[in-house]
Each structure stands twice: as C-alpha cells, then as structure tokens.
Image: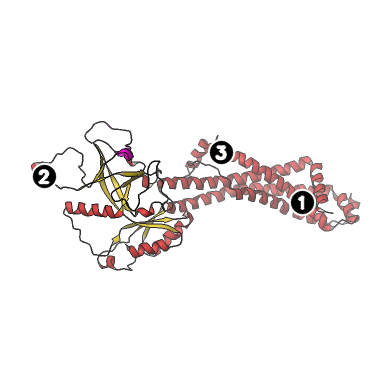
Amino acid sequence: MNNKDLIDLCLRNLLRRRTRTLLAVVGVIVGTCAIVVMMSIGFGLSDSYQEQIASYGNLHMITVRSSGGGGMMQQMKDAKGVINEKALKDMAKMEGVGAVTPVISEYLVIGAGKKITQVEVVGVRTEVLEKFNYKVLEGGRLLNSTDKYELLFGNQVPNWFQDPKSNEWSSEPLNVMTVKKLIITGDESYGQKKQNTEEEEGQKITYKEYETRAVGVLENPDDDSAYCVYMNIDALEDIEKEIKKARKESTFSTGAKTYEQALVYVTDINDSAKISKDLRDQGYQTSSPSDWLESMKETAKMIQGILGGIGGISLLVAALGIANTMMMSIYERTKEIGVMKVIGANLRDIRKMFLLEAGLIGFIGGAVGLVFSFIVSLLMNTVLKDIISMALGSIGGGYGSTISRIPLWLAAAAVIFATAIGVMAGYYPAKRAMNLSALESLRNE
C-alpha cells in the first residue's frame, strides 16, 4: 500500500466517525491553545520587563567604576580595579564591547539670555557617541573631535530653563538650537539677584564664564542620557580645574591619569551579563540596566513554566482522548483489520495507518488550536489589554505595550508537539491492531 492510498484510507476512516473524531480534535485544540496562550503571556511579560528597564537606561550600556584606592595604588600601572588608559584599552579589546569612554561629570549652570538651568554636564570622548548609537533630533548633530565647549543636550534638559528673576513659570521648552550664545559656568548664583553682604564681598568668588552653543538635542526621551548635557571630556577637565582655582582648592595631580568612572557599550545586550561579570572579576564595580533585566527574565521564565505546565495538562488530557478514540476504533474495525491481514496487508502498513490517523488528529487539532491562539493573543493585546494589565500588575508585569507574544518558533513547535502527542497516543492502539490474529478477528466479528 503506497502512502497516497494510506492517507486516503485514514481520512475516510476519520470522516466515517465524525463525532468521535471531532471530540478528539477539540481536545487537542483546547490543549494546544491553552499551552500556546499561557506561554505567550510569559514572553509578553519578558517584553514588558525589557520595556520597563529600557525606560530607565540604555540596555547596551555598562557603567564601570573604579574600586577605589589612593596614593601609590592609583599610580600603579597594573593596579587592579583602577581605570586608567591601559585599563580603557583592555576594556575596548574585550569580545562584545563596541566602544569605551572615560567619564567625568560636574554640575554647572547654563545660561541662555535671562533663562538659566543647573544641570549635570558629562564629559566623554566625542568619537564614541556615534558608536553608542545615540541619535539627535532633526537639525542637530552629535559632538565631534573639533568641538571644545559645544554642548549636546539631553531630550529633557530644554524644559528646565527658567528666568529666576521672574515669578512666572514657563512650560515651553527652550529651543536651544536657536540660541546663538550660551554661557556655561560653575557659578551657582549666575543670572540671579545678588544678595551679598559687605562681609561676604571680601570672600566673593569669581568664576570663569565660557561662551558656547548647542550642536544638537538627543532623540531618546526616557533613559539617563535625557537628563544631562554632554561635552568634550578634555574641555570639561579644563573647566573643573578653573572652578577649583576659583574656590582655591588643590589641583595637585599625582601624574598618573585615572578616572572614577567609564562607560562600556555592549554590541549585543545578551553579552552584557558576561561582560559585567568579567569586569567585576578584574576588580571593577559595574552597574547596568541589563542586570535588573536578567533577574526579571528569571521571574518571567518561572511564571512561563507554571503557565506552560497548566496548558500541558490540557494537552495530556487530549492525548488520553486520542488514545481512547483509537482503541475504540480498533474494537469497531476488528473485522476490517482481519480482512486486511488475510488478503496479505503488510503489518507495518496496518501500524502506520493507525499511527497516521492519530497523527492527523493531533496535527489538525494543533493547527486549528494555533489559529485560535493567535486570535486570543490579538484580543489580549487589544480589547482585554487593560483588564489583563491590572491582573498581571500584581506580579510585577503587564505594563508593556504587549501582553501576549507568540514567536514563530513557538507556533511551529506547538503544531509539531501536538502531532507528536497524537502519534504517541496512537502507538499502543496501533501496536495492538498489528498484533491482532486474523482468524480471531474474523471469528469475533
């Protein structure tokens, strides 16, 4: 018996007992739909966690801090946990690292005419900003190597400019790109009313003011970069020295240039945990939004496993239904099996016929169940989104743009798994049919 005839015979046998076949298929549909939808909620939770963490900071970024130690430790070229030029070069050579820059920061006042704001100014090596995948709004650009005191604004900073001498609060963000001259200084009282007494006049500190301009405003409105201003690290070091001189603070240097902090950009966020661990093993302190993401993903996997297990029970019940259907089919078709054996049918063909019937029930149920899964998933992401978000919120998720997500591999695996369940459920009945005695079959019928 060729495969075409075998498939034709199997389909006719299933259609001959429509009600029983339909009930078995419905069992598989329910089981497949349950397990796919349950697992899709787990994937949705993972996506929700990733969205939440991404809103706190760039998932590709690792902040590396020096482990401390002064004096001779800071001067030692190979000191563990010290961020110096050699350490930065070693970090840049690590597999999976896209870019590295040392970082310094200072809270400075930026003036635009009558309006001022005090903000954290971060000094970086300008060539890494493009490698960090930063984007600017239309009409602007990133910092480049020729920029000295030029500023790159975070998305939220233009909202903070206000006139300190006015009682009216402006809700309109300042268009920093149209301001021809910005002033940057360490003087916290810049632009404000002078209230110094005669005694304080003798102690008055004169801060240097630097003329500058904005070159761009970053696109991203949510992560850490939105709340600071970037400039050339060398220029910011010069400003820091001038501020210390104005305050009569020591500017003594040991000669060995070290940094308290560096930023490491990881090309693939999946490598972030490994690179963070390697850096900690080298004596550095690290922090990254992806560290939180890993722990949240573990929570999502646990929830996904529980939900998938509940769905798996439904599919197990469906498998018992398929086995029952096939066993009843054997009892009803005893004579048919006997005749097939008498006329010389191959025993393997008889086994194959029953396995194929069971597999078809599993395949049809899995395919239809998958269609229903996509429909349920769509409803969960649209009509039922608010209700489910409130329910999932109690377990720390459900506030992302997606409640349920069905990856293509899960869709394919669901159909294959349902088919395999059908074949396994039909194995014992098929073996029983193959072992039936031809004479006993005809006599019993």
Contact between labelled residues 3 and 2, with CB atoms less than 8 Å apart: no
Looking at the image, how many numbered discs can be counted on the residues? Answer: 3
- Seen from the viewer's position, the closer of residues 114 and 28 is 114
Q: On residue 356, which mark appears?
A: 1
- Seen from the viewer's position, the closer of residues 274 and 91 is 91
Q: Residue at x 78, y 50 (%)?
A: 327
Residue mark closest to the camera, 2 vs 3? 2
Q: Earlier in the sequence, mark 2 or mark 1?
A: 2
Badge 2 amino acid: Glu
Q: Which residues are magenta?
A: 158-180
Q: Residue at x 22, y 62 (%)?
A: 253
Describe residue 340's horizontal placement relative to residue 306 as left or right.
right
Image quadrant of residue 2? bottom right
Q: On residue 200, which mark appears?
A: 2
Tell me if mark 1 has few (under 14), some (14-19) or many (20+) residues whose alpha carbon lies within 10 angstroms of its own: many
Badge 3 amino acid: Met
Q: Provide the major secondary structure of the magenta segment.
A: loop
Q: Residue at x 20, y 61 (%)?
A: 252
Give the quadrant of the N terminus: bottom right
- Residue bearing the label numbered 3: 380
- Seen from the viewer's position, the closer of residues 126 and 47 is 126
Give me the C-alpha separation between circle 3 and circle 1. Answer: 35 Å
Describe residue 62's horizontal placement relative to residue 245 as left or right.
right
The answer to whether any part of residue 28 appears in the image is no
Tell me if mark 2 has few (under 14), some (14-19) or many (20+) residues whose alpha carbon lies within 10 angstroms of its own: few
Within the magenta stretch, is there residue 159?
A: yes
Tell me if mark 3 has few (under 14), some (14-19) or many (20+) residues whose alpha carbon lies within 10 angstroms of its own: many
Image quadrant of residue 237? bottom left
